[in-house]
Image (cartoon, grey):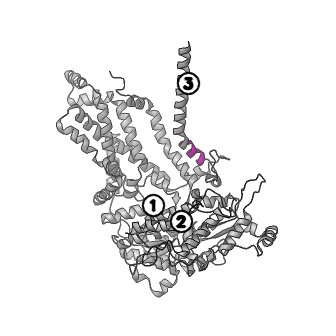
Amino acid sequence: MKKMLATSAIALVISSAAADAETLNILVEGGGEMLQKAVAEQFTKEIGIEVQFTVVPYQGVYDKLSAEIASGQSNFDVASIDVVWNAKFAPHLESLDELFTPEFAADFSPALLADAKLDGRYIGVPAWANAEVVLYRKDLFEKADEKAAFKAKYGYELAPPANWQQWRDIAKFFTRDTDGDGKTDFWGTDTIGAYSEEWMAHVLQAGSPGVVLDAENNVIIDNAAHKEALEFYIAPLCQDKSVPENVTEIGWGEAQNLFYQGKTAMMKFWAHAYRMTPADSKVIGKVGVAPMLAGKAGIAGIPGTWYNVIPSTAANKEAAKKFIAYAVKHNAMGIEAPLGLAATNSAYQSYAGKPGYEHFEPLLKTLAAAATRGRPMHEHYQEIVDEAVLPAVQKALSCEDDIGEVLSEAKETIEDILN
Amino acid sequence: MIERKKRDVGGTVINIFALLLVLSYAVPYVYLLMTALKPAADVQQIPPSFFPNRITLENFSTVLATPSLPAAFANSLMVAVLTTVLSLVLAVPAAYVATQYRRSFTTLFLLFALVTRMVPAVSLGVPLFTVLKSLGLLDTTLGLVLAHTSTAVPLALLLMSAFFEGLPKELEEAARMDGCTRFQAFVKIILPVMRSGIAVTALFSFIASWNEFLYALLLTSEKGKTAPIVIAEYNSVYGLAWGPMTAAAVLYSLPVILITLILQKQIIGGLTFGAVKG
């Protein structure tokens, strides 16, 4: 036993040899590895540089990168980070300006490029991008009697909703008691009360120049567009009764499950969900997809983009840049992964018309929409959301508070955070 | 007779209350188990159901097919065992000396030993990262064992000191009179007497290392990764795979349950150590 322990200890020390210089270490979240694995393998074959992924849980990317940056030494040459961390990490990231030639930049939606640039320099390259689109029950929308009943009631054809009014009408129309017990058991849609991103998309649809903050970091959460969007956001719950009531318990996972269990007719959700309907779901093969809703300013969404960045403490910066450029050039390779996401327009367009990828067109349309833009690029973004934005949305969802007052209170809280 | 009946009723009420208390501790674990046995579509059912509508092992199959999990389980086991052994080797003699050969500085020693537990673990993450990187021990089992030991030793020291406090000094003196050296007295006489205390300390050290997340996250990458990290990866930004996550958690809890059952006698002895001394 003693011998075994001693031998193990020696073996452990020996196995901790220094990293090979020809190995590129990439820090990713689970989904990120899936999306970049194929391109990394091809990169190794063609360029001869090994790629080693370190996969960690979502929050682990932030924690691990923060610790490494704080220590002044990094094990990672590339990190794939969520857009919400761009501002926080920006001062500690390598400039990637040299990669952004006009041709290179032209392959990304403007909103993705805007989020990649901080303090006048590009600090990340979009690796894959997502946005909320509308997923709906194609089978219900195509039923002749439903179509006739809808037209009779609302005076226009039943079709995938394109604007706020249609969304509310269709949600109300499908909300019903299907088993005749006097209780609603099928809803038009859901309202997410555990996150605020969906409301932010409506803020942009309403024509706000920014979400929560403007370009100069002035707090604009109480402007008319924010108010209008919040009124629309709470209406299905507070006025139309077309969503399940327990909204504060509804997050992304719950909304998705309500839809998969066949309890809602539509949901606004991240586009990747289109291909991820479980095989045993009641709605398998019955899902249709449309672009995100349009408001006064047209279609708008909040991009959920992940960026490949190079920590300034990275050891192999040149190899890291090569990989990032290579990953963009072969961006379509990630589409075959279970999440099926990419970042470049050309990658998405290369799958146009392919069965099973019907969500790409609505996704691209949403990402490329003129009113689409990212969340505030501020290092205190998460704090602003946790302490002011989400509480404001949840307060409004109580259906008792005055929207104007709720947003004014949120404004004060945000100003306190910023000052 | 009435008095006896009253006592019986009182006893029954206490027993029912104790049973409810025990069940309330068990509910989260039972819910975890029930979730692990649900089909994917029912896991996040709204409204949630406690019992599965249909029992399936598909989540366990998914977990067992996760390529990184077996290695992560093995790493967790190795780290937890080595951490437990190392912390006992360091803490048991130290606690014995500190309590049995009390000097003015021994109290200070015990107090300062707790320093690493007085600050948030995250604040030690960066220094540990720097030290292990300079030693070339990042992403190794040994590196993580050293990190875990740095927090396990103070706890073990504190627990063992409490156990040694109840030990009569005469025990060592008697052993010395019978011809034992100080070391022999400690190994042959004191340690066997302290078996229960050591078992409790070992169990706490093992569990702390077995479930530790933050240092495992910061100090390992792929080779040294432990199971808590892999289990947390089921919660991705693109969805929470509750079913596989709960199945993995159930499997991960089995060794601890097994060890607790094996050491049950010693643990109960340790927890009641000194409780009946007059």
Q: Quadrant of the C terminus of chain A?
A: bottom left
**Left or right side of B47 for B237:** left
- Residue denoted by label 1: A59
Does A143 sit above or below residue A326?
A: above
Frontmost residue, A23 versus A357:
A357
Amino acid type of the residue tagged 2 in the rendering: Ser
Amino acid type of the residue tagged 3 in the rendering: Thr
Query: What's the CA distance linking mark 1 and mark 3?
Result: 48 Å
Does A46 sit above or below residue B107?
A: below
Query: What's the CA distance linking mark 1 and mark 2?
Result: 18 Å
Give the percent coordinates (x, y) of residue A307: 46, 72
Residues in magenta, as a range: B29-35
User: Tag 2, which chain?
Assistant: A
Q: Residue furthest bottom?
A: A102
Q: At numbered mark 2, what does the secondary structure look like: helix, strand or loop?
A: loop
Q: At numbered mark 3, what does the secondary structure look like: helix, strand or loop?
A: helix
Q: Which residue is drawn at 28% across and 44% down?
A: B114
- Residue denoted by label 3: B12
Q: Dots 2 and 3: beta carbons under 8 Å? A: no
> What number of labels is visible?
3
For the residues beneath circles 2 and 3, the answer to whether they share a chain is no
Q: At numbered mark 1, what does the secondary structure look like: helix, strand or loop?
A: helix
Foreground disc of the pair 1, 2: 2
- Residue denoted by label 2: A196
Q: Residue at x 61, y 77 (%)?
A: A295
Residue A333 visible within the image: no
Q: Residue at x 53, y 38 (%)?
A: B24
